[in-house]
Amino acid sequence: MLLTVTPHAAERLVTILGDQAGENEGLRILARGGGCACSGGSFAMGIDAPTSDDSVIELSGVRIIVDPMSAQQLDGAAIDYVEDVMRQGFTIEAPNAAAGGGACGCGGH
């Protein structure tokens, strides 16, 4: 699975995970159908521990956990952190996400 994390997103995630994640935990990314502020597929992110079925990758100091179903939609995705006058938070641009979307703001810290 090809996944990228921008330097700004990695910096934010390292700080968040360092403050909140336990020893075996990392950033779980889940693909969800519909919802969010975009049409089509969307994603959720949270702190979690991996299961035996998950893929675990280390990118820019961030431990990322993805289940097999989400991995298909996240292949080729880019995670960024956006701060502008209209919004603040993580975004995921995923070219393989379900039709009708793939880019979605997923909360802010």
Image: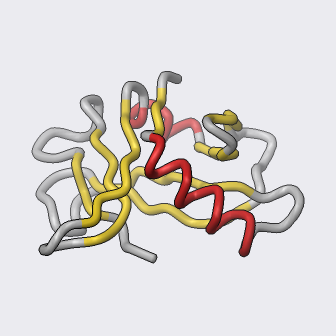
Q: Give the residue drawn at x 52%, y 23%.
A: 1
Coloring scheme of the render?
A: secondary structure
Residue 31 position in % (x across, y down)? 41, 50
User: Which residue appears at 29% of the width and 59% of the height?
Assistant: 82
Q: Residue furthest right?
A: 23
The residue nearer to you, when weighing 42 against 12, is 12
| Residue 78 in the image: above or below residue 86 | above
Q: Quadrant of residue 43?
A: bottom left
* The C terminus lies in quadrant: bottom left
Front residue of 7 and 70: 7
**Residue 15 position within the rendered picture, expressed as x and y whole percent measured from the top left:** 64, 64
Q: Residue at x 54, y 48 (%)?
A: 10
Nearer to the camera, 33 or 75: 75
104 left or right, relative to 18: left
Q: Which residue does the image show at 47% across and 42% down from the upper left?
A: 7
Residue 55 as seen in the image, left or right of residue 99: right
Q: Is residue 49 left or right of residue 59?
A: right
Q: Relative to residue 41, is residue 60 depicted above or below?
A: above
Indicate the position of residue 95 as horizontal and vertical percent values: 25, 30
Residue 90, horizontal then vertical, whole percent: 37, 60
**In the rendered picture of this protein, how many numbered marks are placed on residues?**
0
Residue 59 lies in what quarter of the image?
Answer: top right
